[in-house]
């Protein structure tokens, strides 16, 4: 089955052009080529973590089973050619990113619910369940104000299923300000790893999970719809290399959307399962710990096109991922899914 990006084609062209124009020779970075995961680990290791198989079935790891994948077309009746990620937050409701199904620069209307399928299980090529979508509920300002992915903290969508998903626990959402800067966070999704050696380019990639230090959080980003003001926020993580050479949220270089994250510091050096988000990951959850419980704190909106000065490849070391913060939108989510 053909796969496309978690971003629409024009977004991809813009990002590719920006990345190409920023490239320059840098031997220290060329020696550390990576795509999504550490260059010294295998993708199979990140996929095993995402299945919660031993020894990754302790309280030190979130339960990744609520993380699902979407397969869809922008036109009902056509073969699906897009993939995206999301997380089950109620037996018949999934939380994901708004741009997965609507970007005004590309579409006159959102993707039809009838063209979307939901797969459960770690391998979307052999899903444990397949579900149909009944309804898409976008953040109140997303459909009218989506000129950029991150700017308004509103890139969010709730997906209602025709039938409940059984046999899988729902993920809990952050409901208080407990996202600790400098603490460990985990992300999980179904991004396209067909560029990795041994991956079949004709198949969907399996669910993977990786960890990062939470480097940034913002709030108070306002957008208005029908006279009502909605506040949004962002979370940010960066992809550090094992040798501590690249630390994009800890350096002095800031450009474009990185400024939205504000000032701060960032730890140097990669965690055991350090990684970054790639195409197809959009809408997937970022987990942080609330006491002893892992909860969803953010939904992936996308990555920055030029997070470091000099040579940069999308998905490489230095990549910065931006998440829409759940906490400011918690009440809207709860009111929608009741």
Image (cartoon, grey):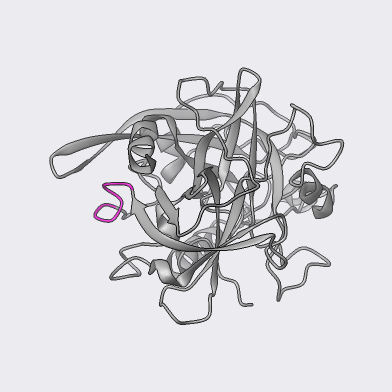
Please give the range of residues in magenta: 139-145
Which secondary structure class fits the magenta region best?
loop
Q: Is residue 14 above or below residue 209?
A: below
Q: Quadrant of residue 25?
A: bottom right
Q: Residue furthest top?
A: 291
Q: Position of residue 270 (x, y in %)?
A: 75, 34
Task: Classify residue 324 as left or right of residue 51.
Answer: left
Taking the spot 47% from the left edge, 28% from the top edge, the residue there is: 217
Residue 205 visible in the displayed image: yes
**Which of the image's four quarters has the C terminus?**
top left
Q: Tell whether position 142 is magenta.
A: yes
Q: Quadrant of residue 293?
A: top right
Residue 100 image position (x, y, % from top left): 45, 59
Residue at (60, 53) in percent of width and height: 68
Residue 325 higher or lower than 158, as above or below = above
Relative to the observer, which residue lies in front, 30 or 65? 65
104 left or right, relative to 330: left
């Amino acid at each position: 089955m053909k796969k496309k990006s978690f971003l629409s084609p024009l977004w991809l062209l813009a990002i590719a052009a920006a990345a190409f124009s920023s490239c320059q020779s840098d031997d220290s970075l060329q020696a550390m080529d990576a795509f999504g995961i550490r260059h010294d680990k295998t993708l199979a290791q990140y996929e095993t973590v995402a299945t919660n198989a031993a020894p990754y079935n302790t309280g030190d790891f979130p339960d990744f089973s609520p993380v699902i994948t979407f397969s869809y077309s922008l036109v009902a009746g056509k073969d699906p050619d897009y993939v995206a990620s999301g997380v089950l937050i109620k037996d018949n409701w999934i939380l994901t990113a708004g741009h997965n199904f609507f970007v005004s620069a590309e579409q006159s209307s959102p993707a039809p619910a009838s063209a979307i399928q939901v797969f459960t299980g770690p391998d979307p090529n052999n899903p444990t369940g397949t579900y149909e979508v009944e309804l898409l509920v976008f953040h109140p300002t997303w459909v009218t104000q989506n000129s950029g992915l991150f700017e308004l903290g509103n890139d969010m969508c709730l997906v209602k299923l025709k039938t409940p998903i059984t046999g899988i626990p729902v993920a809990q959402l952050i409901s208080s300000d407990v996202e600790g800067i400098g603490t460990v966070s985990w992300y999980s999704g179904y991004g396209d790893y067909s560029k990795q050696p041994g991956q079949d380019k004709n198949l969907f990639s399996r669910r993977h999970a990786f960890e990062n230090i939470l480097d940034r959080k913002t709030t108070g980003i306002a957008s208005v719809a029908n006279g009502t003001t909605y506040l949004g926020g962002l979370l940010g993580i960066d992809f550090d290399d094992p040798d501590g050479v690249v630390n994009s949220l800890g350096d002095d270089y800031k450009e474009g959307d990185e400024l939205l994250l504000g000032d701060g510091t960032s730890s140097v050096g990669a965690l055991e399962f350090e990684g970054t988000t790639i195409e197809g990951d959009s809408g997937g959850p970022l987990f942080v710990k609330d006491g002893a419980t892992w909860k969803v704190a953010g939904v992936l909106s996308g990555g920055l096109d030029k997070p470091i000065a000099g040579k940069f490849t999308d998905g490489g070391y230095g990549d910065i991922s931006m998440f829409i913060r759940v906490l400011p939108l918690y009440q809207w989510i709860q009111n929608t899914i009741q």
